[in-house]
Amino acid sequence: MTTADSPSSAAIRHVVHIRLDPALDDSLRIPLENDLRELAAEHPHALAATLHRDLGRRPAAPVTATWMVCMDFASMADFEAYLAHPLHANFLKTHQPSMEFITAIQAPLEGFA
């Protein structure tokens, strides 16, 4: 199965990479990181979520992400409900301007139980 062939009822994994400028002021960084931890802990509409911080070996490299979030959803409908959930929407509205970049990918979880 390819991503294009993935039915809307198939389980998916949502992976996000967020880069924060290493020089971002703590008044912006700390609330962002606290809210990111809350979003991963609550993971509305998701079956599970994990949050990972970069090991910091090359934090100044322009392609290094600071955070990675992985969330598993039972279906595309659950993922779309997550996107609309206030916890997610408010996180992006509040913190996206402080991010150097944010990228996301959704991939099918074949054989996911």
Image: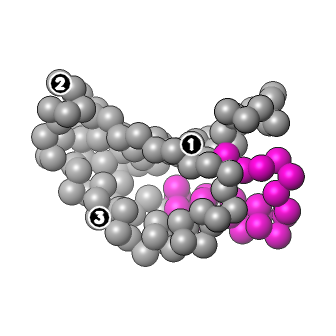
Left or right of 9? Residue 74 is: right
SS under mark 2: loop
Crowd tier of the residue under label 2, counting other residues whose Cα lies within 10 Å: few below 14, some 14–19, many 20 or above: few
- For the residues labelled 1 and 3, say whether their Cβ atoms are less than 8 Å apart: no
Instruction: Give the amino acid at mark 2.
Output: Met
Q: Which residue is mark 1?
A: 17
Residues rendered magenta in the picture:
19-41
Which residue is at a point 60% across and 62% down the rendered structure image? 96
Which residue is at a point 77% across and 32% down the rendered structure image? 61
Which residue is at a point 17% across and 24% down the rendered structure image? 1
Tell me the distance, in whole angstroms, between the alpha carbons under discs 3 and 2: 24 Å
Q: Which residue is mark 3?
A: 81
Q: Which residue is mark 2?
A: 1
**Main secondary structure type of the part rendered in magenta:** helix
Instruction: Give the amino acid at mark 3.
Output: Ala
SS under mark 1: strand
